[in-house]
Amino acid sequence: MNYELDLNNKVIVISGGAGLLGMTYGKAITQCGAVAVLADVVSTEEFDMRLQTANFTKTDNVCQVHMDITKEDSVREVQQQIIKKYGKIDALVNNAYPRNSNYGKEFFDVTYQDFSENLSLNLGGYFVTSKIFAEYFKAQSAGNIINIASIYGVIAPRFDIYENAGFTMPVEYAAIKSGVIHLTRYMAKLLGKDNIRVNCISPGGIYDSQPEEFVAAYAKYTNRENMLDKEDIAGTLLFLLSDLSKDITGQNIVVDAGFTL
């Protein structure tokens, strides 16, 4: 067996590809020889700017496409574009996080309508993309789906770290991410006979200019002095995308520097 992590010639679609993690995943994937198809709803101008900020170059094997994970027609159209351009798709990374304008409120301020809409946008969006890509993978007799969940899909929130942060851990987030983890198991069991693997990564908190007080409070639960860097999740993703993990399916891998212990 070849133990080298090799993604050469693989075509990998990343939803939410223009985001903080999406760009990081895309960069890592191209460095391992694969094509990174970054799918997002942002404008072409915004996409180009983010690619520049992430230090993508013309030599990187990256493709940007406009895709709305909440609309089946959009997902199917993008899928056909990719197949026409590259002849195949090897993997889907469900990484997008759509939400409405009222997202992020305190528990007692969240309405039923907003709760339902945010679950529909995000968990529903993961269902839509997974179903459509799984149809293709089934016909291809091979495929790989990786969902991005969260530690707060695994444990209850540590509310104490939010006390002076100026923001909270939204109830929708916990419901969505726990749902993503079980959707992963459901699909892994259902699709295994079709040679389709489905796994999940649950990252801990990732630093994105949060207040110092919050970072310090968060770090007390980990084995390090700060939060995770966006690059800290990429290695686990690359492993799950590679043939080194060919017999791993239905799993949720927690990457959190010990936060959930």
Image: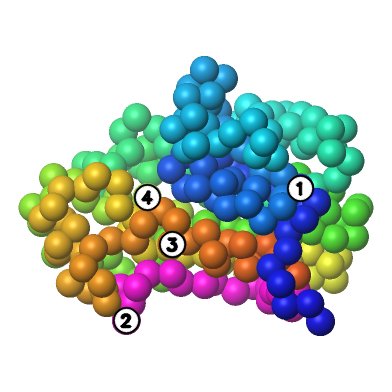
- Which residue carries the number 3 mark? 232
Query: Do labels 2 and 4 touch, CB within 8 Å?
Result: no
Q: Specify few, some or many for label 3: CA neighbours under 10 Å numbering under 14, 14-19, or 20 or more.
A: some
Of labels 1 and 4, earlier in sequence is: 1
| Mark 3 to mark 4 CA distance (whole Å) | 25 Å
Amino acid carrying label 2: it is: Leu
The boundaries of the magenta stretch are 244-261
Q: Is residue 121 above or below residue 145?
A: above
Amino acid carrying label 4: it is: Glu
Which residue is drawn at the image coordinates 41% and 53% (left, top)? 230
**Residue 29: which disc?**
none
- Which residue carries the number 4 mark? 172
Residue depth check, mark 2 versus mark 4: number of the one nearer the observer = 2
Residue 132 point in image, percent of width and height = 75, 45
Q: Specify few, some or many for label 2: CA neighbours under 10 Å numbering under 14, 14-19, or 20 or more.
A: few
| Mark 2 to mark 3 CA distance (whole Å) | 18 Å
Residue depth check, mark 2 versus mark 1: number of the one nearer the observer = 1
- Which residue carries the number 1 mark? 11
Is 45 one of the magenta-colored residues?
Answer: no
Quadrant of residue 80 within the rendered picture? top right
Of labels 2 and 1, earlier in sequence is: 1
- Which residue carries the number 2 mark? 261
Of labels 3 and 4, earlier in sequence is: 4
Q: Is residue 165 left or right of residue 178?
A: left
Q: Is residue 55 above or below residue 203?
A: above
Quadrant of residue 188 within the rendered picture? bottom right
Amino acid carrying label 3: it is: Asp
| Mark 1 to mark 3 CA distance (whole Å) | 22 Å
* Secondary-structure class at tag 4: helix
Query: Do labels 1 and 3 touch, CB within 8 Å?
Result: no
